Image (tube, rainbow, N blue to C red):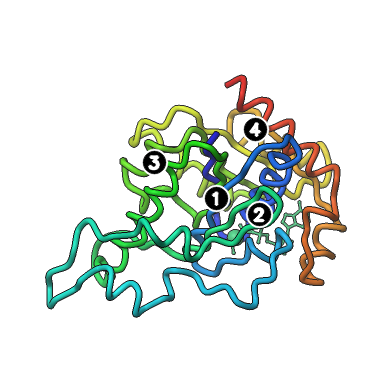
Amino acid sequence: MKIAVCGKGGVGKSTVSSFIIRALLERGRKVLAIDADPSPHLARLLGFDDSDITPIAEMKELLDERSGRDGPFYNLNPKVDDLPERFMKKKDGLSLMVLGAIRQGGAGCACAENAVLRNLLNRLLLSKDEDIVLDMEAGVEHLGRGTIASVDHILIVVQPYRGSIETAEKIDRLAQDLKIESLHIVANNCRDEEDVRFIEQLCGRKPIGVFHFSPETARAERKGVAITDAAPELVKEADNIIARLEKA
Ligand SMILES: Nc1ncnc2c1ncn2[C@@H]1O[C@H](COP(=O)(O)OP(=O)(O)OP(=O)(O)O)[C@@H](O)[C@H]1O
Ligand SMILES: [Mg+2]
């Protein structure tokens, strides 16, 4: 299955992505994790050594070369097929590709560079023999119809505060415009039943999963070690989410 994880800044997209990835691996699946966050740190959360990882979005020379930019002209279908092999990190059934931020069109848009990143993302999403988890920025708008069409499920992470749920509603509307059918709320950082109820009431629906506040996860993140080893109960909840998505 191909899952995209989005939500307001700091709500726990990378945390939720990491536990879903871990749960898929524990099911014996091969997983491709794609980090499309402007300040990517999924590698560290998953226990990769990230000291030698440069996001593709920051490889200026490579992007210039592939985009074939010449003044205002650039290649709309740049070559990317060799890039996964060159830049993918691998470990125990898990592959990781760190893309970095893919920007939306419009004023100040680095469109030539984005054509390369978007092409690469689309190519990665075509992978047939792996499950995919895409850790994104807030919304889905910068992805475009073609890209989003290759994702099976979208998870919007929210926390028990109004701002995160307002962002989720915006994403929900955009997703509906893009005709995405499988879209679900994941409640994160809940401390008690009241937190879960607040989310249910404001979202007007039940979350597909609830991640409780996990001091072990917070501690592992601060230490800079893999969070996925720190909280088996969050792996379990991620596994429940996968089971529900499979039925959806
Ligand atoms: N359930 C949880 N229990 C404890 N700490 C959590 C939990 N979820 C997230 N955190 C902590 O909150 C912080 C933000 O989480 P995370 O990086 O996953 O958010 P994000 O949405 O990916 O952020 P960004 O928008 O910057 O990419 C991290 O320090 C993380 O360890
Ligand atoms: Mg993140």
Asked if disc 4 and disc 3 are in contact, CB closer than 8 Å, the reply is no
- Queried on whether the Cβ of the residue with tag 2 lies below 8 angstroms from ligand 1, the answer reads yes
- In this picture, is 74 found above or below 215? below
Residue beneath disc 3? 148
Whether the residue carrying mark 1 lies under 8 Å from ligand 1 is answered with yes
Q: Position of residue 139 (x, y in %)?
A: 45, 51
Residues under labels 4 and 2: Cα distance? 20 Å
Question: With 127 as the anchor, is 69 left or right in this view?
Answer: left
Which image quadrant: the N terminus? top right
Would you say the beta carbon of the disc 4 residue lies within 8 angstroms of ligand 1? no
Which SS class for mark 4?
helix
Q: Tags 3 and 2 in contact by the CB under 8 Å rule?
A: no
The answer to whether 201 is drawn above or below residue 170 in the figure is above
**Alpha carbons under labels 4 and 3: distance apart:** 28 Å
Circle 4 crowding by C-alpha within 10 Å: few under 14, some 14–19, many from 20 = few
Identity, as a three-letter code, of the amino acid under mark 2: Gly
Task: Report the residue marked by disc 2.
Answer: 12
Q: Are marks 2 and 1 in contact (CB under 8 Å)?
A: yes
Horizontal and vertical percent position of residue 84: 46, 58
Residue at the disc numbered 1: 7
**Which residue shows up at 45% across the image and 44% down it?**
171
Q: Nearer the viewer, mark 4 or mark 3?
A: 3
